[in-house]
Amino acid sequence: MPITVSVRDGNVGKSLMQLKRTLIKEGLFKELKKRKFYVKPSLARKLKREAAEKQRNKDMKRERRAALKADF
């Protein structure tokens, strides 16, 4: 499915920003960054584990904050 952005009133800058937002939302930039270099499978597993740990920590902090707010 191609991504299309129309230019209105000759405002190319605004249209480029809309395109960029759309591409970020689709995850294209993350995919390009990920494919820029070859990552060995062992390193990929390690990075995946580290990302999961980081996400767990963020979720725990968010839950603690929500619990503290609920106490007040």
Image (cartoon, grey):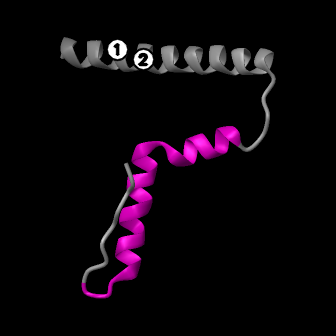
Which residue occupies 20% across, 11% down?
Answer: 71
Magenta-colored span: 9-35
For this view, does 3 lie left or right of residue 49?
A: left
Mark 1: few/some/many CA within 10 Å (<14, 14-19, 20+): few
For this view, does 29 lie left or right of residue 17?
A: right
Which residue occupies 73% across, 16% down?
Answer: 46
For this view, does 33 lie left or right of residue 54?
A: right
Quadrant where the C terminus sits is: top left
What residue would you read off at disc 1?
63
Tell me if residue 24 comes above or below residue 57 in the rendering.
below
Q: Label 2, secondary structure: give it.
A: helix
Tell me if residue 17 comes above or below residue 46 in the rendering.
below
What residue would you read off at disc 2?
59
Q: Give coordinates of residue 61: x percent, y percent.
A: 43, 18
Q: Residue 57 lies in magenta, yes or no?
A: no
Which residue occupies 58% across, 40% down?
Answer: 31
Q: Label 1, secondary structure: give it.
A: helix
Q: Give coordinates of residue 69: x percent, y percent.
A: 23, 19
| Tag 2 near tag 1, CB within 8 Å | yes
Q: Marks 2 and 1, Cα distance to the nearest angstrom?
A: 6 Å
Q: Give coordinates of residue 62: x percent, y percent.
A: 37, 20
For the view shown, which residue lies furthest in the bottom direction?
10
The amino acid pointed to by label 1 is: Glu
The amino acid pointed to by label 2 is: Asp
